[in-house]
Amino acid sequence: MPRINLLPWREAERKRKRQEFYLSLGAAVATAALVTLLGQWQMSSAIKQQQARNDYLTGEIAILDKQIEEINGLDAQKQRLLARMEIIETLQRSRPEIVHIFDEIVRVLPEGVYLTYLRQSGNRFELRGIAQSSTRVSSFMRNIDASEWLAEPTLQIVQTNSKGTGSEFTLFANQRSHAAPGDEAAQVAAK
């Protein structure tokens, strides 16, 4: 009987199956590598795109921050200008008051009283002078109290002159406020 050797065929079949397995395994590894590379590329692309968006937003935020600083600077400048305007308006309204004050000082100054020093600090006046007697200083204080432009006289010192010619005195008086009719709200707000 003829002998048929099936071993080489089985061996060839095993070899072919082994090659198919390795080929399938290589294809699977290549496909996995390709999928991984594509995934990494896509993620890298998405990260770069998001980074570009973030950089754009950071730049725009920086521009807006500069604009906000400019706006705040303009607001501060506006407040300074408004304060200056208010001071100028106050000075304009109070400009004729000093004339009235000087006129009033002359009217309330009794005979025998001479002023040697006058100083204004805000609404407070310091008056120094010489009087023939302390009763004339008292009369001066009563006249100031009854005055339309001066109020609240307070005597700081009265002393007899070293020459014996009278009394030297120092007193303080406050200026009465004479605001225009529209300024009453400003006075209430100031108090």
Image (spheres, rainbow, N blue to C red):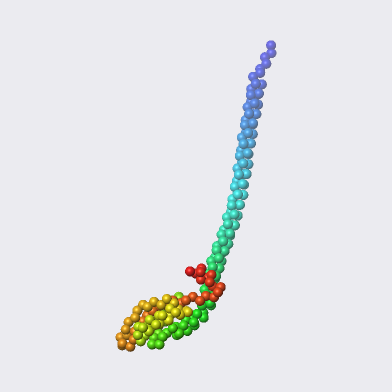
Residue found 51% across the figure and 68% down from its top: 189
Q: Is residue 130 visible?
A: no
166 vs 79, left or right, is left
Q: Position of residue 155 (x, y in %)?
A: 37, 78
Residue found 55% across the figure and 65% down from its top: 75
Residue found 65% across the figure and 26% down from its top: 16
Q: Position of residue 139 (x, y in %)?
A: 39, 82
Please tell me whether residue 130 is drawn above or below residue 3 in the rendered image: below
Q: How many marks?
A: 0
Q: Position of residue 130 (x, y in %)?
A: 37, 85
Q: Foreground residue, 162 or 36? A: 162
Q: Position of residue 161 (x, y in %)?
A: 32, 85
The quadrant of the picture occupied by the N terminus is: top right
Q: Foreground residue, 95 or 82? A: 95
Q: Is residue 20 visible?
A: yes
Examine the image and state in which quarter residue 138 appears: bottom left
Q: Foreground residue, 55 or 178? A: 178
Examine the image and state in which quarter residue 142 appears: bottom left
Q: Residue furthest top?
A: 1
Residue found 60% across the figure and 49% down from its top: 50
